[in-house]
Each structure stands twice: as C-alpha cells, then as structure tokens.
Amino acid sequence: MPQSSALSIRKLGQVSVPVKDVARAVVFYRDVLELKLLFQTGNMAIFELDGLRLLFSVAESPEFDHPGSVLYYDVPDIHAAYELLRSRNVEFLGAPHAVGKLGATEVWMAFCRDTEGNVLAIMSEVAV
C-alpha cells in the first residue's frame, strides 16, 4: 500500500479547450453560453464557471492541436436551455434525452458543437 504524501488533489482547477479562432470562440462562450470572461489575450481566453477555469487557446505545438474533451454544462432546465440555445443558432446533434437514472432522478443530455468544432453538452438531473 502506498504511503501518504503531501499531494492532495482537491478539485479540477482548469480545463484547456483547443480552438482555431480565439475571438470567434469568445463570442460563442461569452455571448451564447453566457460564461464569465476573466480575460483575453492574443491567443487565449480564460473563462470562469463556479470556480473552474476554462482556457480556450490556439495550440502552441502539434501535440496540443486536437479536438478537446467533451465539457458537460449543468443547467437547471434542459428543455428551456435547449430552446434558448437553438434560438441563438446553436445546432444540436439531437434533442435532449434521458441517458440514465440516479436514484429518484434521470440524467438528461443534449449535445452540440461550438464554433471551433468541439462537441459539448448541456445536462440536467430531472426528478422522476
């Protein structure tokens, strides 16, 4: 059994999402998804979401130039969020749908792409 160390990871602090056009990505995440922009420089922008930083940047080298991980944005009402984002010209890959049950709730998701081709999702837990 490994011995205890001083390292104690507490939470996810930042997620990096590769983009081709930072300005275009800022418009999507700030204006369409309404995330809080902390700052923007030439090749990167950092947003904050309940203590988690989201870094959108142009890849500095080939090993970082690939589609990002899927980010799941928790919303209180998935159907209302879906309709609002559709009214903002977000094209979804499908309608909101249940993907599983967690006790007395169902987990619902709907997937779309941002302006940079990254897949993202909105999700909600709905009481059943």
Image (cartoon, helix red, strand yellow):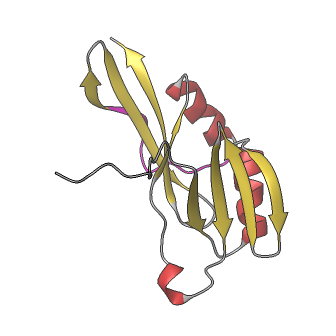
Q: Residue at x 82, y 75 (%)?
A: 42
64 vs 9, nearest the viewer: 9
- For the stretch drawn in magenta, the main secondary structure is loop
Is-magenta flag for residue 95? yes
Q: Quadrant of the C terminus?
A: top left
Is-magenta flag for residue 91? yes
Q: Residue at x 82, y 57 (%)?
A: 39
Q: Position of residue 18 (x, y in %)?
A: 58, 70
Q: Position of residue 105 (x, y in %)?
A: 33, 17
Apparent side of residue 49 relative to residue 4 in the rendered image (left or right): right
Apparent side of residue 122 relative to residue 94 in the rendered image (left or right): right
Apparent side of residue 90 relative to residue 99 in the rendered image (left or right): right
Q: Position of residue 62 (x, y in %)?
A: 52, 88
Q: Residue furthest bottom?
A: 62
Q: Residue at x 35, y 28 (%)?
A: 107
Q: Residue furthest left?
A: 1
Q: Magenta part of the protein: which range? A: 89-98
